[in-house]
Amino acid sequence: MQLNISAIILGAINVVLALGLAPLFEGILRKITARIQSRQGPPLLQPYFDLLKLLGKEDIESGHSPRMQRFAALLSLATVLTVAVQIPMGGQAPLGGQSDVILLIYLLTLSGISTLLAALAAGSTYSLVGMSREMMAMMTLEPLLAVAIVIGAVHTGTLRLDQVLNGAVYTSGMFPVAGLIILGIILFALQAFVGRMPFDTAEAETEIMEGPMIEYSGPKLALFKYARMVKLFLYTALFVALFVPWGQTGFYPLDVIIFLVKVTVLVLLVTLIAATHARYRIDQAIRYYAGLFGLALVALVFAVSGF
Amino acid sequence: MAARDVLNSIKKRFDGVIQRVDVPADNRLYLYVQPEMIKEVCRYVFRDLDARYVISIGIDDRQQSNRFIVAHDFSFDRENVLASIMVQVPASQPRVECISDVVPAANWAEREMRDLLGIESIGCPNPKRLILPDGWPEGVHPLRKDVPWNHVPSNFDENKEYNFDEVPEGCTVVPFGPFHPTLDEPAHFRLYVEGEIIRGCEYRGFMVHRGIEKLADSVLTYNEIPMLAERICGICGCVHSVAYIQAVEQAAGIKPTPRAEFIRTIMLELERLHSHPLWVGLASHILGFDTLFMQSWRIREPIMWIAEKLTGNRKTYSLCVVGGVRWDITTELKKELQGVLDTLEKEWVKVANAVKGDRNIKARTKGVGIADKKLVKDAGLVGPLARASGVPIDCRRDLPYAAYDRVDFDVIVEDGCDVWSRLIVRVMEVFESIRIIHQCLEKMPEGPIQLPINDELPPGRIGLSSVEAPRGESHHFVITGENNRPDRWRVRAPTYQNLQGIPAMIKDQQLADMTISLGSIDPCFSCTDRMEIVDIRSRKIRVYSQEELLQLVRQRNG
């Protein structure tokens, strides 16, 4: 299939949306959190200022391996932006059949790997503890999303992104048992995917001093922080595409607005949960993920049986 | 008489061993024993009579008796007696038998005695330095009377690094501190970690030792010391000020006026009321539950404001003088305080319910940081830490002081031995403190707030005082001296004992549980020893050393 101009434009718009709006959603998250905590909270635009300030700072080489450190920071933002090109934000999945779900899953894993590289580059004990936590979390978390996507693929009989990321989990033709189970699972795991309370075990400021981030400062830290914000935006977008793609009018600008409203609702949900929960210990978190994974396998069995 | 009973049971066993006895009141007992029998007497008192070890004190008494004195303080909590068991040590050979193999809790105190006074403990199981840095020369002992308070030996090597123990096989070292987001003071734990499990640790602390005791016995006067005492701690300042003044009063045989006693009680409880919510907030923050952190501190803030109205300051109350207090509580302030307490109570009920019902907090704190009864006894743990392990000790009830014998309150005890129980104990104690203050405000008699003191305080008298700080018993030991100042003042904050329990509490636990297990210490990053100055015009970077910085500061002040 030919890659056409409209796909490129649509993909570019997605990247701009992700880069432009991710700090705003972070700002909303911070403001609402502050309100729940009886605080005034920072201005909505504060995350933009934070990034600008960090970007303008001196670029210090530090840690065990500065070159890998720089690479990890670039990789982390680059990966999430590549993901942004592929998932639908209002319209169709921009690349259509040119990319598939396998690539998407790989890219999401790669963004986790950039965190591991960052931790290795720092070489401090705390970052290594953070790395082992991140690795354990990745191994139990990633399969959940994979199962969700595979269920969609099983139902549609294709790996094409534009078809799977369009509420395909419900298209079994019967009562969508698998789709509903996986919806619940991903909802419960969303907090962990975006690395917020109670699942920020890999960074855990009060335990291991931000773990993998320990040696980062200035522009490189800005890239990582940016990637983290974009991640919040992307995973909610992915959730929308997988589970609640409905309500599209076909008029693109309006669809983008509808999409953003859905994302906002999910961000509010993430905020609310983050503000009302204490952090899990890594073993508790893994047990939680493992429980979800067990359920996901059940959903998969339903899916291949045609539900 | 309680003190007599205790004395008689010791006498029955060690008749010829006791050299001198003093029972100044029915709740105090001082006895001198033969130096070679000190270990046996301590074993008997600690194990058979089941007294609680408080602290050991070294005293340089060479000017008076040409001897050093070593005092081991014990508390008989059930008999309501504080006892000091003392030995005299010849100045030429300052050695005393080590008691820390029978009383493990005495380890730090004995090492401190060696560092600061040069009194060796024969057979000490862990003779490492505790307080003096490794670069400090041998043979210079700051608390000796012939060492001036501002003396720095010329051969002091401030850059010398600590000499750490061997790392156990198969473990990696995780340095915890001196700087860590949840560590409130520069203290260093060197954790031996296997995977995520802590197998052991070595503690090095006392990095900002300020020489407060030395200042008190060489520079300040009796009524100046409370101002310094309340600056010992960033939270329980009033506790130290009251404990010190009570020790002096007890030594000199002075009883403060009743109204002053009530005012002291009110301020001590007010201090607990701002300390416990602060701790609950910090603990939540460590667990990553910032919402409770913020709410708990918001609820705490009005307490700080009413303290400021009462005393002129949020936390340094400038409360005590010998024989009374320095300011009164007026009728208007009394009414306002009652209002603040009512609001606090209402809001704290919500916090208590939220904490008790929170599954995540429970999951993170249940079975974490276990301190069983044996550890409490052996390490001399105090306060909420002991009470959460089913050991019902509380100085307010066991060794009553100020007006605590005239108010009614419950001692909160839990038996989980873990962080969860400590959390519950602290949360519930807030309600008891509110009760105590309400009663004090009702029962407080009219009258003077100070006793006229027309005479010099008699020298050479001993005073002991224990005050229940929010974190546990603060114990002060005073010997009165010449020149309107004490000859020796020894402060034992509750953390001094509680920290000694930490290695056992974190052993074989997850690394993630370390911070919450340690959780009850408070923040201060105070020892910046160098900083960088960048000259923008010449683009030159200059690094100042500690000495240069000190010089700069002194030039400016001079």
Image (tube, coloured by chain):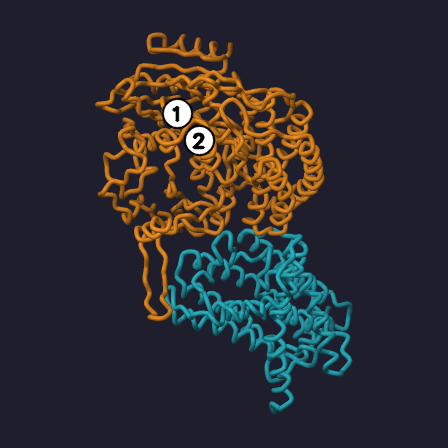
Chain colours: A cyan, B orange
From the image, which quarter does the C terminus of chain A lie in?
bottom right
**Residue ID at (67%, 26%):** B439
Would you say the residues marked 1 and 2 are in contact, meaning their CB atoms lie under 8 Å apart? Answer: yes
Vertical relation: A45 (above or below) B219: below
Residue A80 seen in render: yes
- Decide if residue B443 is on the left or right side of residue B377: right
Residue A77 in the image, given as x and y percentages of width and height: 52, 73
Label 1: few (<14), some (14–19) or many (≥20) C-alpha neighbours in 10 Å: many
Q: Chain under label 1? A: B
Q: Amino acid at mark 1?
A: Pro
Establish whether labels 1 and 2 are both on one chain: yes
In the picture, measured across the screen, residue B342 lies left or right of residue A67, that is: right
Mark 2, Cα crowd under 10 Å, few <14 / some 14-19 / many 20+, is many
- Considering only order in the chain, which callout, 2 or 1, is on the residue closer to the N terminus? 2
Percent x, y of residue A129 = 45, 56
Amino acid type at circle 2 is: Ile
Marker disc for residue B225: 2
Q: Secondary structure at mark 2?
A: helix
**Which quadrant is the N terminus of chain A positioned in?**
bottom right
Residue B501, image x, y percentages: 45, 35
Classify residue B455 by image quadrant. Answer: top left
User: Whole-percent x and y of residue A281?
Assistant: 54, 51
Q: Nearer the viewer, residue A264 or B91?
A: B91
Q: Chain of mark 2?
A: B
Which residue is at the front of the view, A134 or A11?
A11
Q: Residue at image x 42%, y 35%?
A: B500
For label 1, the SS is strand
Check residue B486 in the rendering and tell me which mark sits there, or answer none.
1
Along the viewing direction, whichever of B37 and A114 lies nearer the viewer:
B37
Residue in front for this viewpoint, B205 or B127 = B205
Q: CA distance from mark 1 to mark 2?
A: 9 Å
Q: As drawn, is A280 to the left or to the right of B439?
A: left
